[in-house]
């Protein structure tokens, strides 16, 4: 009968029990588990009531539960129920291959008078559910077993834990193990090993492993292998090597252990060490499995180590494993990625000689590579020898790969010619009048698809042949090809990039008519063009349509529109645009609000800026540091530093940490008001808060100290700046030199001026003129004249009408009058090197007046 056939098939996995119950071999138990008959539940005389033919009863139960529910015989089942015992139930459960039938039988048996499930029957159903990948029913079964406190042996408990682990139910496995006491079971080494195996994939073996060692159980390779696997999966490199060392020391290394570590090395990118492990494995007389070779080859290709992948493939073939299409596919794809044409063609030829038919996707990648590298003759050979095997979409896919490669190589014109030939479907080469040499023929059966057109249209757009792309699009529509969403998006985007808005709107309408829904990209392409043009009404209308179709405008586009309006002095219109965006249902990002606030601050409309800031931050967004910085800078620039400080304090109260920029703005504001004390207080607060001062910080304070006639403190700060590794720039030197001149420290200023020149920093005219006048005041006419000579050599003079032009004239007149430099100045004037020397009388008059 059917049941006996099922039993025969599984007899090697489940040996028959002996006639004496005390000598029975427990099912689902490791050979190392506790097999003492006195510890086995229901192990004594639990078959004493069986009739003389128990197999017949099992056969009949098997037949009944192999049928649908409505075809079962209720009376027959009631009769059979009298003879139920755990051995019969277990046998039937193991024979019912359908998990639903097994589950129904299990539930039916549980309801019969005088019968109680044992750990063997629970495990029989658990095994079936595990094979069927039924996590939910298995979890329910385990909970039922725990609720009923079904006694278990350590081996049976271990088997159940392995069933849970095979479905990734690590938490449930842990729970069952911890409840062993409720099941009258004291876990042994085998139970621990099963638990470690179940926990390995979740990476939670460490605590249980330590618990096992502390409990005194002896560890073996079945203990350490799950720990090794867990460390490998977690990427714990050193820990994994430590466990591997222990396994190796005890002589427990097998092909599985080698494989686990080698595969992990591959995943970690340790390609060379993975190869070393394979060599070590071979040296130990072990041979990697075919799956191991495949995993390693995939890993090596992923890491870009094609040399090692090729070596491993040779080892694989040397081990009498024949590579299949998948392994050739990954190798050829890897060499395609590296653009190693010779290797691609080598493996491609080997693949064909092995009788493996290349996938169309693989051929497409080969064709794209060859065309992309300009190897058109080789590409044509590959195409010609394969295209007869394909038709329809697959054939077009090959030609599309050729088109893609041509475009990638920059041969867009050749790609266009090929596409035109595909559109004509003529069984000939390209037109003779073409000046471009081509190598591909097109059969009548080939018709380009939307992908073909998109490839060439994108290529034409990249080389700024938008009009040719539009013409090709029209031809595509004329031949009955509707195109696709991608084609419309690409053309609309390119039209918008050159601000051909009217045409992009026309194409948008045609897109809708063709049945393609505009995407967020479509709308934002047009919205971006409207933003650059500052077209507010059109932008708002487009936003309403986007809202209707559930698309979001991109922040960069509406921020650009707002910034343009502010730059054009249309701050009120920019603000109104933000309000209308809110009404449509798109509250703008804080960046856009900040742009408008910045525009208002630039126009000194601080009241309006603060009102906008308050309204939108209260209703829509929490302000960020950048928004506060803009507002604080605006008030400081307007001379309202006290109000700026209030906003600064408000920002602090809201938990926002001021940036260095914030402090710099405040310090500059105080310095502008001459309140260097408050500026230094801000500096102290900033550094105490952990903010590192920048060159702007130091420059601001040095300028402020010099303006307050505190040059010594300015020099102390200058030295501090350099000691802290913040190197002064051209602006910092300018501030210090100019400040020292104002404080009457011309000689010190001259030293820093020379230092500035040594650092290849070119001083501006204003600094030179200021320093020249300061040196004259200090009666250092020689240094002042040397400075004038440098200005003459570099032709670095202020223009007439500028403030510093009159100062230059004043300095020149002083030098002209002084006997130590007078003759030298006259020579410069006579040689025409001096811009004010056109009228010497003017200088003399200036001198006389002086």
Image (spheres, rainbow, N blue to C red):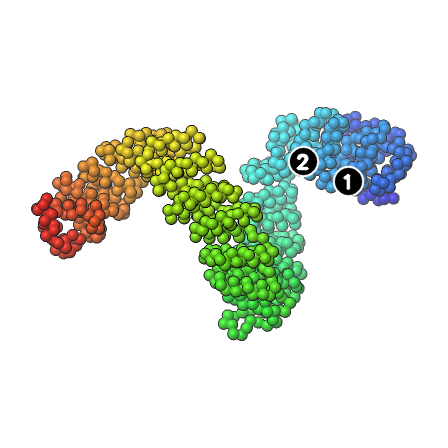
Is 454 drawn above or below residue 709 in the view shown?
below
Q: Position of residue 302 (x, y in %)?
A: 56, 50
Residue at left offset 50%, top offset 42%? 583
Q: Name the element at disc 1.
A: helix
Q: Name the element at disc 2.
A: loop
Residue placed farthest to the bottom in the image? Answer: 432
Q: Relative to 59, is 327 on the left or the right? A: left
Q: Position of residue 540 (x, y in %)?
A: 49, 48
Q: Which mark is residue 128?
A: none
Image quadrant in which you'd find residue 498: bottom left
Is 230 drawn above or below residue 452 in the view shown?
above
Q: Earlier in the sequence, mark 2 or mark 1?
A: 1
Q: Relative to 250, is 4 on the left or the right? A: right
Q: Which residue is mark 2?
A: 169
Q: Which residue is mark 1?
A: 99
Residue at left offset 43%, top offset 43%? 575
Quadrant of the rendering where the C terminus is positioned:
top left
Residue at left offset 17%, top offset 54%? 833
Image quadrant in which you'd find residue 76: top right
Is 203 drawn above or below residue 546 in the view shown?
above
Residue at left offset 13%, top offset 44%? 781
């Amino acid at each position: 009968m059917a049941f006996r056939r099922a039993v025969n098939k599984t007899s090697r996995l489940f040996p028959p029990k002996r006639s004496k119950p005390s000598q029975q071999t427990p099912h689902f138990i490791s050979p190392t588990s506790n097999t003492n008959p006195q510890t086995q539940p229901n192990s004594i005389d639990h078959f004493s009531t069986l009739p003389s033919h128990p197999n017949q009863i099992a056969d009949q139960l098997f037949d009944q539960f192999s049928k649908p529910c409505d075809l079962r015989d209720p009376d027959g089942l009631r009769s059979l129920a009298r003879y139920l015992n755990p051995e019969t139930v277990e046998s039937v459960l193991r024979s019912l291959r359908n998990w639903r039938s097994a589950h129904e039988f299990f539930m039916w048996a549980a309801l019969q008078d005088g019968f109680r499930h044992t750990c063997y029957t629970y495990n029989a159903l658990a095994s079936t559910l595990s094979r069927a990948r039924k996590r939910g029913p298995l979890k329910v079964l385990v909970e039922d077993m725990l609720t009923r406190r079904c006694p278990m042996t350590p081996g049976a408990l271990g088997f159940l834990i392995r069933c849970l682990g095979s479905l990734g139910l690590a938490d449930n496995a842990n729970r069952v193990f911890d409840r062993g006491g409720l099941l009258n079971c004291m876990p042994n080494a085998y139970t621990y090993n099963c638990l470690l195996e179940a926990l390995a994939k979740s990476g939670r073996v460490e605590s249980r492993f330590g618990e096992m060692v502390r409990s005194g159980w002896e560890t073996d390779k079945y203990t350490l292998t799950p720990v090794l696997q867990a460390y490998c999966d977690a990427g714990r490199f050193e820990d994994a090597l430590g466990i591997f060392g222990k396994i190796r020391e005890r002589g427990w290394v097998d092909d599985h252990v080698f494989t686990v570590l080698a595969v992990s090395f591959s995943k970690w990118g340790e390609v060379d060490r993975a190869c070393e492990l394979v060599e070590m494995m071979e040296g130990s007389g072990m041979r990697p499995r075919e799956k191991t070779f495949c995993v390693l080859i995939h890993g090596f290709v992923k890491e870009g180590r094609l040399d090692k992948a090729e070596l491993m493939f040779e080892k694989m073939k040397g081990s009498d494993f024949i590579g299949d299409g998948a392994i050739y596919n990954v190798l050829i794809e890897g060499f395609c990625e590296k653009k190693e044409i010779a290797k691609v063609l080598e493996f491609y030829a080997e693949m064909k000689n092995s009788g493996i038919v290349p996938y169309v996707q693989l051929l497409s990648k080969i064709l794209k590579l060859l065309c992309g590298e300009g190897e058109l003759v080789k590409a044509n050979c590959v195409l010609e020898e394969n295209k007869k095997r394909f038709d329809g979409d697959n054939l077009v896919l090959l030609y599309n790969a050729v088109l893609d490669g041509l475009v990638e190589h920059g041969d867009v014109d050749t790609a266009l010619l090929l596409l035109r030939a595909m559109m004509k479907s003529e069984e000939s080469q390209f037109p003779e009048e073409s000046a471009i040499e081509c190598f591909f023929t097109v059969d009548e059966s080939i018709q380009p698809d939307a992908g073909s057109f998109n490839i060439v249209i994108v290529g034409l757009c990249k080389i700024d042949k938008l009009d040719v792309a539009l013409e090709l699009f029209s031809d595509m529509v004329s031949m009955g090809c509707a195109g696709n969403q991608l084609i419309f998006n690409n053309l609309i985007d390119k039209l918008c990039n050159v601000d051909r808005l009217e045409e992009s709107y026309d194409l948008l309408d045609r897109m809708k008519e063709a049945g393609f829904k505009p995407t967020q990209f479509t709308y934002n392409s047009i919205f971006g063009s409207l933003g650059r043009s500052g077209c507010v009404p059109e932008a708002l209308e487009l936003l309403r349509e986007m809202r209707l179709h559930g698309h979001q405008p991109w922040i960069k586009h509406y921020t650009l529109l707002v910034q343009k309006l502010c730059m054009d002095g249309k701050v009120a219109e920019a603000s109104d645009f933000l309000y209308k965006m809110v009404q449509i249902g798109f509250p703008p990002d804080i960046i856009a609000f900040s742009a408008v606030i910045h525009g208002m601050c630039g126009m000194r409309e601080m009241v309006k800026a603060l009102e906008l800031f308050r309204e939108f931050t209260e209703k829509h967004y929490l302000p960020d540091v950048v928004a506060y910085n803009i507002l604080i800078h605006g008030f400081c620039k307007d001379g309202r530093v006290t109000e700026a400080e209030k906003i600064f304090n408000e920002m602090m109260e809201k938990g926002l940490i001021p940036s260095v920029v914030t402090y710099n703005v405040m310090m500059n504001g105080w310095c502008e008001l001459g309140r260097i004390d408050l500026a230094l207080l801000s500096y102290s607060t900033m550094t105490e808060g952990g903010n590192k001062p920048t060159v702007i910080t130091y420059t601001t304070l040095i300028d402020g100290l010099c303006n307050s006639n505190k040059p010594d403190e300015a020099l102390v700060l200058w030295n501090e700046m350099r000691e802290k590794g913040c190197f002064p720039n051209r602006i910092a030197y300018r501030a210090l030199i100019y400040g020292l001149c104002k404080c009457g420290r011309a000689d010190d200023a001259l030293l820093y001026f020379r230092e500035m020149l040594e650092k290849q920093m070119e001083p501006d005219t204003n600094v030179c003129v200021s320093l020249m006048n300061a040196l004259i005041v200090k009666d250092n006419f020689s240094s002042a004249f040397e400075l004038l000579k440098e200005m003459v050599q570099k032709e670095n003079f202020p223009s007439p009408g500028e403030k510093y032009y009159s100062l230059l004239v004043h300095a020149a007149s002083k030098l002209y009058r002084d006997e130590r430099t007078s003759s030298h100045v006259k020579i410069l004037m006579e040689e025409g090197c001096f811009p004010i020397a056109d009228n010497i009388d003017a200088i003399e008059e200036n001198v006389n007046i002086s």
